Amino acid sequence: MAQANGKIILLGEHAVVHGFDAIAVGIERGARAHAQVAAPARLQLGHLSAVAGDGSELSTAYEALLTELALGPHHVQVELELPPGAGLGASAALGVVIARAVLELHPRAGSSARVLAAAGAWERVFHGNPSGIDVAAAERGGCLLFSRSQGVRVIPVARELSLVVALAGAPASTRQMVEQVQQQLDTRGEIVQKTLEAIGALVVNARLCIESGDLPGLGQLMNLNQMLLAGLFLSTEGIERACAVARAAGALGAKLTGAGGGGAVVALSAGDPESLLSAFHAAGLPCFATRVLPSSGGLAP
Ligand code: PMV
């Protein structure tokens, strides 16, 4: 069984599409897959099935991935452990895990560069203009600084990050949200560019907070990032409500994560995540806790 991570963007989504750094952490929930060599190429994702040439978006993405790998047709069965469209990197986790499952059958063909290239081809079908941060986090895990020009740099984590993710609204299309920011750049470019630069500055400071263990500082930067994302019309009433619930329950910071327009909120807990989990439950929001361990930048359940 091949495996890949989901991800949480701690700060910097959308700005990363336009060349700025963003910070992501891998989470253990992700996707698992099993492959066999067989024709015609076929993908089984839960109850969804896609066969090469059926014209669906799923089969187009799967064919793009297989074409990039150039290893012939395969049957792949995938299980997704993340809600799709919630900003938790579900589609990137699928692309990475499918590429890994196929490459596992061809041990001499495998390398992380090939996984990234194949998953990138898959992502482009769904997202149009992905920055690559989702695929990098799904492939690598840990706590990462990512930019289009510099790729992945590992951030050493001084103090454990205790995070709680809540589903604050219906899934949104990453492609549409990214296009909406591009349209704003086209129509009111100067102010949007300033907002993206400000988000870039928050990311620079957040990296220092993670490296020095300044969790209250990190939380404040997350709150500021949320305000700037709201200024780009990426927030929703549900997201604002979920952030307010988290802050009232003692979160150091809370913001949307991923594309926005719905989907997930991430809150930084001051320690034990229990009070945040109960507050989200009381507000009727599905949620889970995850941790990023110190210095290793490693994964925890
Ligand atoms: O919503 P997700 O998990 O697809 O995250 C998207 C992150 C964006 O910065 C909005 C897009 C991108 O490609 O980086």
Image: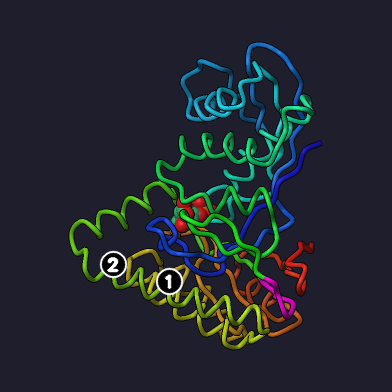
Badge 1 element: helix
Q: Is the magenta stretch mostly helix, strand or loop?
A: loop
Residue displayed at 67% across by 72% down: 163
Instruction: Name the residue tied to disc 2.
Output: 193
Residue indicated by mark 1: 200
Tag 2: amino acid: Gln
What amino acid is found at the position of numbered circle 1 in the picture? Gly
- In percent of width and height, residue 12 lies at 47, 67
| SS at circle 2 | helix
Q: Is residue 291 magenta?
A: no
Q: In this rendering, does residue 163 appear at all?
A: yes
Q: Does the magenta stretch include residue 159?
A: yes
Which x, y percent locates residue 132? Answer: 51, 49
Q: Which of marks 2 and 1 is nearer the N terminus?
A: 2
Apparent side of residue 295 relative to residue 227 in the rendered image (left or right): right
Residue count near mark 2 (Cα–Cα under 10 Å), binned few <14, some 14–19, many ≥20: some
- Please report the bounds of the magenta region as a residue range: 156-163
